[in-house]
Image (cartoon, coloured by chain):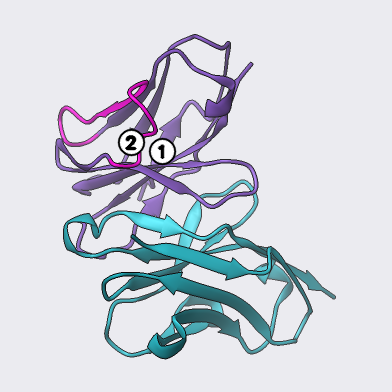
Chain colours: A purple, B cyan
Amino acid sequence: GAGVSQTPSNKVTEKGKYVELRCDPISGHTALYWYRQSLGQGPEFLIYFQGTGAADDSGLPNDRFFAVRPEGSVSTLKIQRTERGDSAVYLCASSVNTDYNEQFFGPGTRLTVL
Amino acid sequence: AQSVTQLGSHVSVSEGALVLLRCNYSSSVPPYLFWYVQYPNQGLQLLLKYTSAATLVKGINGFEAEFKKSETSFHLTKPSAHMSDAAEYFCAVSAGGTSYGKLTFGQGTILTVHP
């Protein structure tokens, strides 16, 4: 079956612009996670959803970052007033639920802020 | 708070040699521990996980890891390296409780396998 998909695969934007990154989880997975991976680093947790609600958003770095999952499936990570330091690969993962089940990762969206 | 330290950002072995990738964790609660592998231009894939059952955990592709509470370690091993094992490996810890879905990752270890 289809895995986690993320669009776009690459996004280049200018400093100060607004961007949206999309994640399509595996069908039937109720939990969805966003991570950010900077060059040479491990993934860094941003937020996770159980259904439509954000169960833990403690990793969002500041109020420029926001994520939604209105129907409990597709999620969008939104970044306002982008900064060069936001450049990274943004990873999405999903799992059947959050009970220590395997998190299946997508290929990521590489964001470059010029 | 949880944290993970992977000792050695790069490990190089010969094909057929033992693979040992080191991971130490810090957790204020009983941890749940994971090893993920990332091949070039691919997403992270779960190799194995420890969730308080057997301390020796077997995963895919011949990898295994042993949870040692006294040493706060969860090292990954494979008896005989194969060329296809070349990738980046990440150790991760989950807090449990209300944040059990949140993984904290180490910085990763790049494994190179020489013929």
Q: Is residue B13 above or below residue B89?
A: below
Q: CA distance from mark 1 to mark 2?
A: 5 Å
Residue B63 location in percent, x, y? 53, 81
Please name the predominant secondary structure of the magenta segment in the image. loop
Q: Secondary structure at mark 1?
A: strand
Contact between marks 1 and 2 (CB within 8 A): the answer is yes
Q: Quadrant of residue A62?
A: top left
Look at mark 2 in the image and give the residue it sits on: A24
Magenta highlight range: A58-73
Residue B57 location in percent, x, y? 41, 85
**Tag shown at residue A87:** none
Residue A83 visible? The answer is: yes
> Depth check: B60 or A81 in front?
A81
Q: Is residue A68 above or below residue B11?
A: above
Q: What amino acid does circle 2 point to?
A: Asp
Look at mark 1 in the image and give the residue it sits on: A5
* Residue at 44% across, 44% down: A106
Residue A105 location in percent, x, y? 42, 50
> Depth check: A35 or B80 in front?
A35
Within 10 Å of disc 1 (Cα), the crowding (few <14, some 14-19, many 20+) is many
* Residue at 15% across, 30% down: A71
Q: What amino acid does circle 1 point to?
A: Ser
Answer whether residue A78 is magenta in the image: no
Q: Quadrant of residue B52?
A: bottom left
